Image: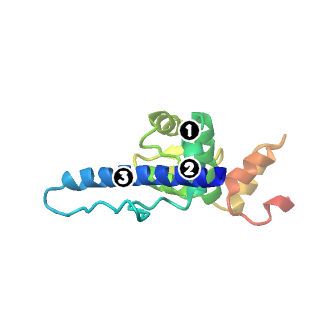
Amino acid sequence: MALQESLAKFKKQQEKCQSTLTSIAAKAVSSKPSVPQNFTPAAPTKPPTPAVKFSNDTERLQHINSIRKAPVGAQIKRVIDLLLETRQAFTPEQINEACYVDMTANKAVFDSLRNNPKVNYDGKRFSYKSKHDLKDKSQLLVLIRKFPEGIAVIDLLQCTGGFTGIRNL
């Protein structure tokens, strides 16, 4: 008996939500005068068909929301990691698509990246700026000879990008 009551209560909640969605949709359509449409109310004996489809990818949307609600430092790290891994220049819109950090809406992230010593900003695009600007292996050899006391491996890995054999040195 309790199961039947719960089911009836659930159906009433569904009908109430559906009527709310229908009224919202009707208000949205009434605000557009160029497209007249007639809405007929659903019969109370029949369960209404959903007028608004909800997204099936809630997990992805929750992930995006958690990134955007994260502290500024965490968002900056995500962008710098993206720039380091890809070694490409990105616009703020492309960064938003790639790692879900909305730099146009978050001025603190934008300003921090623009002034970050590891990031180069040319007015339109952000790109990774390594500590040493190396183009080929000969420049790498000159850099290594310039520091007889040694150079940090992490600095070499970041500035060499796609050099092969750097890990074997």
Q: Amino acid at mark 3?
A: Ser
Element on which disc 3 rests: helix
Q: Is residue 38 left or right of residue 78?
A: left
Looking at the picture, tell me which residue is in the foreground, 151 or 105.
Answer: 105
Q: What colour scheme governs how the chains and residues are painted in the rendered image of this protein?
A: rainbow
Q: Is residue 35 left or right of residue 57?
A: left
Q: Amino acid at mark 1?
A: Lys
Mark closer to the chain start, 2 or 1: 2
> Which of labels 3 and 1 is toward the front?
3
Q: Is residue 30 left or right of residue 169?
A: left
Q: Is residue 103 left or right of residue 143?
A: left
At horizontal 46% and vertical 38% (from top left) the residue drawn is 106
Question: Which quadrant is the C terminus positioned in?
Answer: bottom right
Q: In x, y percent, where is residue 60?
A: 58, 56
Q: In x, y percent, where is residue 37?
A: 20, 64
Number of the label disc, if any, that sits on residue 61: none
| Distance Cα–Cα, label 3 vs label 1 | 32 Å
**Residue 71, above or below 165:** above
Residue that mark 2 sits on: 64
Element on which disc 1 rests: loop
Mark closer to the chain start, 2 or 3: 3
Q: Amino acid at mark 2?
A: Ile
| Distance Cα–Cα, label 2 vs label 3 | 30 Å
At horizontal 58% and vertical 44% (from top left) the residue drawn is 67
Task: Inspect this view and state whether residue 83 appears.
Answer: no
At horizontal 47% and vertical 51% (from top left) the residue drawn is 12
Q: In x, y percent, where is residue 4?
A: 61, 55
**Farthest left residue in view:** 34
Picture quadrant where residue 22 is located: bottom left
Number of the label disc, if any, that sits on residue 69: 1
Number of the label disc, if any, that sits on residue 19: 3
